[in-house]
Image (cartoon, rainbow, N blue to C red):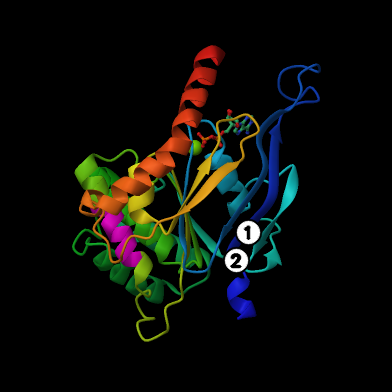
Amino acid sequence: MAAQAIAALDLQHITCAFGGNGTRRGSAAPAYVAVKDVDLAVAPGEFVSVVGPTGCGKSTLLNVGAGLLAPSSGRVEVFGEPLAGINRRAGYMFQSESLMPWKTALANVVAGLVFRDVARPEAERKACAWLERVGLAGFEDRYPHQLSGGMRKRVAMAQTLILDPDIILMDEPFSALDIQTRQLMENELLALWAEPAPGKEGAPRAGRAVLFITHDLDEAISLSDRVVVLSAGPATHAMGSFAVDLPRPRNVAEIRNQERFTELRAQIWAVLRDEVLKGYDRQRRAA
Ligand SMILES: Nc1ncnc2c1ncn2[C@@H]1O[C@H](COP(=O)(O)OP(=O)(O)O)[C@@H](O)[C@H]1O
Ligand SMILES: [Mg+2]
């Protein structure tokens, strides 16, 4: 039982301040405290979404979990071990395009494995299996510009998942897609999250933990086991954590018609709405 209590990713009392001491706006400028004393844990196999207004510190928190940004104070644990440097148990998918435009789909997916010293024939065999898995068999030799936006996201998903991360960190990965493509990708993400990686079919479900950042509440509810709401910045903190007790497997388009979905949305929106308005107001005044 004790092992189950260990979080895959545990952000404890995280505070992130930027600038100050003359590094940003002159010597008189105080540091800008983006997030303050945030606690956020994701259990192994759990799908957690974080929602909050634009500029509240969602990406900042994800970067802390990825080990790309050291917090000003607080502690990060990965499967019970303190995180030092890059989080090697995690794979990332960001909002922007992450593919190398000069490499084919196959070469893009192979790259991470080759970087980890996997022999090329083995890496290519795995990459082909992953491209097939994300519905891109036959597109191995296409370059990113020869693929649609949705296909490029599929390549990026294969690129992330081929490394079989125990933790998947996603920062608004589908926000640039049209709504239909986006819902297709969300369903595929849920299917991939629920199944073992190619070659590990017989193994017990590893239980990848997902930390998914979005500003879209419907997306958060339809995908997640739990939705965490962040306050408007500065000094962003967690306002609440809502368990999403909707059945799985889910179709993200259809689950939105369920009565329970509407109830959850109203409940979470009641907390999020004021923060969105505050965030909007602060941005307008800052502009
Ligand atoms: N490297 C940085 N230097 C200074 N300010 C930053 C830096 N990164 C983020 N911020 C500020 O911290 C706040 C939170 O940013 P971010 O995490 O990107 O928000 P979100 O992802 O929720 O839109 C914003 O006000 C942003 O301007
Ligand atoms: Mg962001």
The image shows residue 19 at horizontal and vertical percentages of 72, 28
Measured in 3D between alpha carbons, the distance from the residue under mark 2 to the one under mark 1, in whole angstroms, is 6 Å
- Is the CB atom of the residue marked by disc 2 within 8 angstroms of ligand 1's nearest atom? no
Question: Dot 2, how many residues are within 10 Å of its Cα: few (below 14), some (14-19), or many (20+)?
Answer: many
> Which SS does the magenta portion mostly show?
helix
Relative to 6, is 26 above or below?
Answer: above
The magenta segment: 184-192
247 lies left or right of 170: left
Q: Position of residue 222 (x, y in %)?
A: 32, 52
Given the image, on which type of amino acid does mark 2 rest?
Ala
Q: Is residue 74 left or right of residue 225?
A: right
Disc number for residue 10: 1
Query: In percent of the image, x 54 and y 46: which residue is there?
Result: 240
- Magenta segment: does it hold 183? no
In this view, the residue in front, 75 or 131, is: 75
Q: Secondary structure at mark 1?
A: strand
For the residue pair 277 and 207, the one nearer the viewer reads as 277
Q: In the image shown, does 151 or 220 lie closer to the viewer?
A: 220
- Quick one: SS at disc 2? loop
Q: Is residue 101 visible?
A: no
Give the image location of residue 59, x and y in percent. 53, 41
- Looking at the rendering, the quadrant in which ligand 1 lies is top right
Please report contact status of discs 2 and 1: CB closer than 8 Å, yes or no: yes
Q: Residue at (21%, 58%) from the top-left corner?
A: 139
Left or right: residue 141 compared with residue 88: left
Q: Which mark is residue 18?
A: none
Residue 158 appears in view: yes
Q: Which residue is mark 2?
A: 7
Question: Whole-percent x and y of residue 48?
Answer: 47, 55
Q: Residue at x 18, y 62 (%)?
A: 138
Residue furthest to the bottom: 202
